[in-house]
Image (spheres, grey):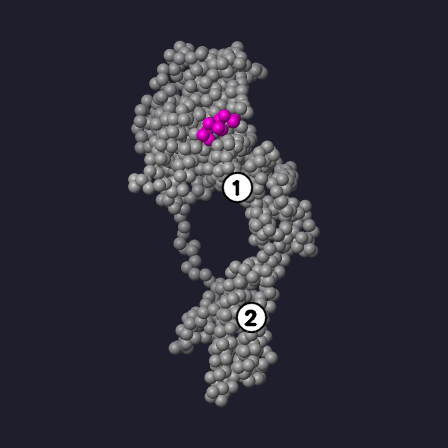
C-alpha cells in the first residue's frame, strides 16, 4: 500500500529535486505535516533541507503578517467593542460571555465565507422584524423591543469589532483569511518560495478557494487532491460533493501545468475485508476494540501496530478504549482532542469555586459550607495534594463536622483540630478576597499537582495516568495564565463569580491535544484527525447516526435559510465533509472493523450510521474482490448462575452473635426490623453495617422525636407518683417552648434555628407540645368530674422478660416512654411524633402480627405490656 503522503513525497522529490528547500507544502492539519516528514525522509539516505511545511491555518497566519488572537482574547476584545456600541445599556461580562462565543463563531464563518456582512445582517434583521410583527398592530412588548434591538445591533457589533482589531493590527482567523484574499499575490511575493503545494484538501471555504485560485493563476501554486472514482464519478454521492466542484472548475485553465492530481480507484479495485459489528453500550465497543487489537498481536509474533488506527467518532470513548487495550501494547499515540470538561481537573476546579463562592455568599470571613469541604476533601486531586496525610486529615475533619453537627466551618476551626496541618489545606481554604487572590491560589495548587504528577512519572515512565494528568494540568494552567494576563489588561474581569462563569465556559469549549511520537505505535484518533493519513488496519467505533455524521444541530445566530442563500456551510455541507472522511479512511485500508452501539438511548437512537448502511448495500456490487460482513455481538448470561433469592446460611459465628443477643435482650425495634425484612436485620445486627454519618442541616424526624421525648420526660419527672392537676399542666405548658429550644440547641446552634426549615420545624414541635398539654388538661378535667385521678407511675422505665425456646432462654427488653393510671386502668404510652392510623393499632387476628409490617406500633406496645 502506498499512502497518500508517500505519494506526495515521491511526487515532490521527483519533480522538484533541486528545489526542495524552496517549496512550501500546505496540509489541512498539522498532523499531516508530521507524518509527511517521515515519508519524505524514507526517500533519501542523505541529509537534505526539507521544504517548509504548514497547516492551512498556520500558512494564513504567516502570510497575513498580523497577530491572530486566541478565542479568549477575542471574547474580551468583542466585549470592549460591544460596550462602545451599547454604552450604559451593556450587559455585565458574565452574561455577555454566555452568548458572545456563538457570535464570534458566526463572525468567523462570515469572513472566511467572503460574505457581504452588511447584507447578511440586514436580511437577518428584516426576518426578525417580520417574526415580531403584530397583526393587530399592537405595540411591541419590552421583551420584543429588546429582542429586536439585538438583531439590529449585530451589524454594529461586527463593524466596531473589526474596526477595533484593525486599529490594533490584530485579527481572528476568518478576518485573517479575508485580508489575505484581498491581496494574496502581494503578500506571497514577500516570500521566496518557488512553489506552494496544497495537498490533501477536500472542502474549502470561499476564502481558501479564492486564495488558492489567485496563487494558481499567478503560477505560484499547485494542488494535489486525494480522490476516488467511487464517490467522485457518482454525482449523488455526498462524499464527492466538494471534489466534483473543484474538478468541474477547470483548474487547467488557471495554470496549464496544473492538473487535477490525483484520482484513484482503490475503493473499487483493492481487496478489503470489512466487518460491521453491532455492540451493546459504549464500554462494550471499547472492550471489543481491545480484543481486535489482541487478535492483530496474535497473528504476528513481532507485530508493528504503526499501520493500525483506532478511530473514535465519539471522543468520550478515549479512556475506555485506552483502559481496554492489551498490556502487550507498549506504544500508543493519541492524536485527537479530548474535552477538558471530562477530566478530573475540571471537577476539581468546579468544587473549589463552589466552596469559595458559597463562602462569599455567607458574608462571614473564612466560613465554609460543610458539604463543600467534604466534597473537595474527597476529590482524588485533593488526596494527592494532601499526600500521605490525606486519609488521616480527611477523616479527622469529616468526623469533627459530624460530631459537632457543624453546618458551617472555617479554617480557624479546622486548625484547632488535633491534626498535622498541610500546606495544601492552607491554600485550598485560604480566603478569596478578589480575582488576584484566586489566581494566586490556583497557581499554587497547579504547582503542587505538577510536582506530584512529575514525581509519579519519574517513578514509572510508562505510567499513562500520570502522563494524562500532566496533560490536563498543562491545558488548565494555560487557561488560568491567559485569563490572568487578560484580567490585567481588561477591566471586565473583576468579580470571582464572573471569573468562574468564564472559566467554566472555556473549560467546556477546550479540547486537549495530546502530544507524542506521531509515527510510532498504535494510533488513536478522531475522524477529523485521519485527514491525509492511511492505515492498513482500521477499527472505527461509534459509527452511529447522530455521531457519524454529527446531525443537524447548529449553534449559530444565523438562520439556515440565510446561510444557504449567502453560501455559508449548513448541516448538508458538514455531512458531506463527514462522508468524505469516512470513505477516504477506507480507501487504502485492507482490514476494516466498523463498530456501532446497538443500545437505544433516551432519544431512541441506536441505529448504525447511514454511511454504514450505504456501504452494506452497495459496496460489494462495485468491488467484487472484497467481502463485507455484518454481525451482532451478544453476551449470553446463564440463568443457572442467577440466584432466585438471597440466602444467608447461619454459620457458627452468626449463631454465636444471636446467642449473645438472646442473653443481652432483644428490643421491640430490633424484632420489628426482623419482621419487616430479615435481610435488613442481618445487615444491621449481624454484619454491623450502618448508614454513613452526615451533618444534619435540617431538623430530621429522629431529632424531632428525641427532643420532644426528652422535653416531656424532664417536665413530668418531678411529678412521678403525684396526682396531675390543671395547675401542674398549665405550668408545664408555659415553659415547654423554652425547654424545647434548650434541647434543640444540643443538636443545632441557635443561629440555625432562627430561619428557614428549622424555624418551621421548631414551631411545629411547639404546636405538638402545646396541643399535647391541652389534651392532658381536658382529660384531667374529665377525670376530676368522675372523682378519678391521673397519676404518672413511671417514665423511661426499662422492662425485661424471658421466654424459653427449647433449651435456650431468650431475654426480651424494652423501655416505655410512660406508664400512668387513671383510676381504672394502667396505661402504657409510647409517644409518636409521626402519623399513626387507627388500623395500625387495632388487631383482628393475632397471626397478623407475624406478617403485617403495618402493625409495628401494635407489636411494640403489646411487647411492653407483656
> What is the tally of numbered marks visible in this picture?
2
Name the quarter where the N terminus is drawn: top left
Would residue 56 be visible to someone looking at this image? Answer: no
**Residue reaching furthest bottom?**
787
Q: Residues within 10 Å of mark 1 (few under 14, many from 20)?
A: some
| Disc 2 target residue | 737
**Camera-nearest residue between 356 and 381:** 356
| Disc 1 target residue | 501
Q: Note whether 499 is above or below 844 in the view shown.
A: above
Q: Note whether 167 is above or below 628 in the view shown.
A: above
Task: Please give the name of the residue rendered at 55% of the width and 29% of the height, measured from the top-left corner.
Answer: 517
Residue 203: image location, x then y, percent: 41, 25
> The magenta stretch spans which residues?
156-165
Q: Tag 1's secondary structure?
A: helix
Q: In which quarter of the view is residue 616 placed? A: top left
**Camera-nearest residue between 719 and 250:** 719
Q: Residues within 10 Å of mark 2 (few under 14, many from 20)?
A: some
574 displayed left or right of 460: left
Amino acid at each position: 500500500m502506498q499512502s497518500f503522503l508517500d505519494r506526495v513525497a515521491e511526487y515532490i522529490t521527483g519533480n522538484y529535486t533541486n528545489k526542495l528547500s524552496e517549496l512550501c507544502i500546505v496540509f489541512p492539519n498539522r498532523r499531516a505535516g508530521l507524518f509527511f516528514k517521515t515519508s519524505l525522509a524514507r526517500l533519501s539516505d542523505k541529509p537534505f533541507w526539507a521544504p517548509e511545511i504548514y497547516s492551512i491555518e498556520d500558512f494564513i497566519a504567516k502570510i497575513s503578517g498580523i497577530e491572530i488572537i486566541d478565542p479568549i482574547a477575542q471574547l474580551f476584545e468583542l466585549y470592549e467593542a460591544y460596550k462602545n456600541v451599547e454604552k450604559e445599556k451593556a450587559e455585565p461580562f458574565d452574561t455577555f460571555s454566555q452568548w458572545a462565543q456563538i457570535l464570534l463563531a458566526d463572525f468567523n464563518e462570515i469572513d472566511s465565507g467572503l460574505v457581504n456582512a452588511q447584507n447578511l445582517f440586514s436580511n437577518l434583521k428584516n426576518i426578525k422584524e417580520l417574526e415580531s410583527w403584530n397583526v393587530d398592530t399592537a405595540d411591541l412588548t419590552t421583551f420584543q423591543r429588546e429582542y429586536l434591538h439585538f438583531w439590529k445591533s449585530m451589524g454594529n457589533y461586527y463593524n466596531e469589532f473589526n474596526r477595533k482589531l484593525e486599529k490594533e493590527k490584530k485579527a481572528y482567523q476568518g478576518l485573517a483569511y479575508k485580508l489575505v484574499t484581498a491581496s494574496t499575490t502581494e503578500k506571497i511575493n514577500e516570500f521566496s518560495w518557488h512553489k506552494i503545494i496544497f495537498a490533501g484538501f477536500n472542502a474549502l471555504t470561499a476564502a481558501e478557494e479564492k486564495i488558492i485560485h489567485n496563487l494558481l493563476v499567478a503560477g505560484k501554486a499547485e494542488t494535489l487532491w486525494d480522490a476516488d472514482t467511487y464517490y467522485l464519478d457518482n454525482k449523488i454521492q455526498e462524499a464527492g460533493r466538494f471534489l466534483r466542484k473543484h474538478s468541474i472548475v477547470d483548474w487547467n485553465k488557471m495554470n496549464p501545468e496544473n492538473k487535477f492530481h490525483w484520482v484513484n480507484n482503490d475503493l473499487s479495485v483493492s481487496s478489503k475485508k470489512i466487518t460491521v459489528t453491532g455492540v451493546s453500550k459504549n464500554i462494550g465497543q471499547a472492550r471489543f476494540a481491545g480484543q481486535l487489537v489482541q487478535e492483530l498481536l496474535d497473528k504476528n509474533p513481532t507485530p508493528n501496530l504503526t499501520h493500525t488506527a483506532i478511530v473514535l467518532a465519539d471522543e468520550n470513548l478515549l479512556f475506555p478504549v485506552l483502559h481496554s487495550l492489551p498490556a502487550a501494547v507498549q506504544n500508543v499515540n493519541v492524536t485527537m482532542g479530548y474535552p477538558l470538561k471530562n477530566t478530573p481537573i475540571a471537577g476539581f476546579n468546579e468544587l473549589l469555586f463552589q466552596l469559595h463562592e458559597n463562602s462569599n455568599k455567607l458574608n462571614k470571613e473564612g466560613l465554609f459550607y460543610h458539604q463543600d469541604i467534604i466534597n473537595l476533601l474527597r476529590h482524588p486531586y485533593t488526596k494527592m495534594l494532601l499526600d500521605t496525610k490525606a486519609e488521616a486529615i480527611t477523616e479527622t475533619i469529616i468526623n469533627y463536622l459530624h460530631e459537632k453537627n457543624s453546618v458551617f466551618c472555617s479554617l480557624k476551626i479546622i486548625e484547632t483540630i488535633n491534626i498535622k496541618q498541610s500546606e495544601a489545606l492552607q491554600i485550598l481554604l485560604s480566603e478569596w478576597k478578589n480575582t488576584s487572590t484566586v489566581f494566586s491560589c490556583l497557581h499554587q495548587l497547579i504547582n503542587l499537582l505538577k510536582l506530584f504528577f512529575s514525581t509519579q512519572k519519574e517513578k514509572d515512565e510508562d505510567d499513562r495516568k500520570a502522563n494524562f494528568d500532566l496533560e490536563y494540568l498543562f491545558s488548565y494552567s494555560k487557561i488560568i495564565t491567559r485569563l490572568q494576563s487578560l484580567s490585567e489588561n481588561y477591566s471586565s474581569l473583576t468579580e470571582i463569580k464572573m471569573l468562574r462563569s468564564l472559566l467554566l465556559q472555556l473549560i467546556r469549549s477546550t479540547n486537549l491535544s495530546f502530544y507524542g511520537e506521531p509515527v510510532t505505535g498504535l494510533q488513536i484518533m478522531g475522524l477529523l484527525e485521519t485527514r491525509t493519513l492511511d492505515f492498513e488496519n482500521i477499527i472505527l467505533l461509534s459509527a452511529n447516526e447522530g455521531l457519524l455524521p454529527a446531525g443537524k444541530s447548529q449553534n449559530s445566530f444565523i438562520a439556515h435559510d440565510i446561510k444557504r442563500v449567502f453560501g455559508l456551510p449548513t448541516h448538508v455541507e458538514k455531512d458531506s465533509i463527514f462522508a468524505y472522511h469516512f470513505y477516504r479512511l477506507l480507501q487504502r485500508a485492507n482490514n476494516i472493523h466498523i463498530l456501532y452501539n446497538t443500545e437505544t438511548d433516551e432519544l431512541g437512537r441506536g441505529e448504525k450510521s447511514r454511511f454504514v448502511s450505504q456501504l452494506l448495500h452497495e459496496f460489494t456490487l462495485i468491488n467484487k474482490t472484497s467481502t463485507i460482513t455484518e454481525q451482532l455481538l451478544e453476551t449470553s448470561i446463564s440463568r443457572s448462575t442467577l440466584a432466585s433469592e438471597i440466602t444467608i446460611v447461619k454459620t457458627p459465628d452468626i449463631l454465636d452473635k444471636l446467642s449473645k443477643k438472646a442473653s443481652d435482650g432483644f428490643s421491640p425495634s430490633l424484632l420489628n426490623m426482623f419482621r419487616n425484612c430479615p435481610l435488613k436485620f442481618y445487615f444491621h445486627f449481624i454484619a454491623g453495617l450502618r448508614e454513613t454519618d452526615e451533618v444534619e442541616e435540617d431538623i430530621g424526624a429522629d431529632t424531632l422525636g428525641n427532643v420532644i421525648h426528652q422535653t416531656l420526660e424532664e417536665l413530668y419527672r418531678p411529678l412521678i407518683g403525684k396526682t396531675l392537676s390543671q395547675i401542674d399542666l398549665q405550668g408545664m405548658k408555659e415553659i415547654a417552648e423554652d425547654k424545647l429550644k434548650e434541647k434543640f440547641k444540643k443538636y443545632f446552634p441557635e443561629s440555625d434555628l432562627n430561619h428557614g426549615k428549622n424555624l418551621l420545624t421548631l414551631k411545629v414541635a411547639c404546636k405538638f407540645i402545646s396541643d399535647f398539654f391541652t389534651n392532658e388538661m381536658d382529660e384531667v378535667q374529665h377525670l376530676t368530674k368522675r372523682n378519678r385521678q391521673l397519676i404518672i407511675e413511671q417514665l423511661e422505665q426499662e422492662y425485661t422478660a424471658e421466654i424459653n425456646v427449647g433449651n435456650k432462654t431468650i431475654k426480651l427488653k424494652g423501655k416505655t416512654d410512660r406508664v400512668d393510671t387513671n383510676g381504672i386502668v394502667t396505661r402504657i404510652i409510647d409517644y409518636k411524633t409521626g402519623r399513626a392510623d387507627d388500623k395500625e393499632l387495632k388487631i383482628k387476628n393475632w397471626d397478623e402480627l407475624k406478617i403485617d409490617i403495618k402493625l409495628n406500633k401494635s407489636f411494640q406496645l403489646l411487647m411492653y405490656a407483656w
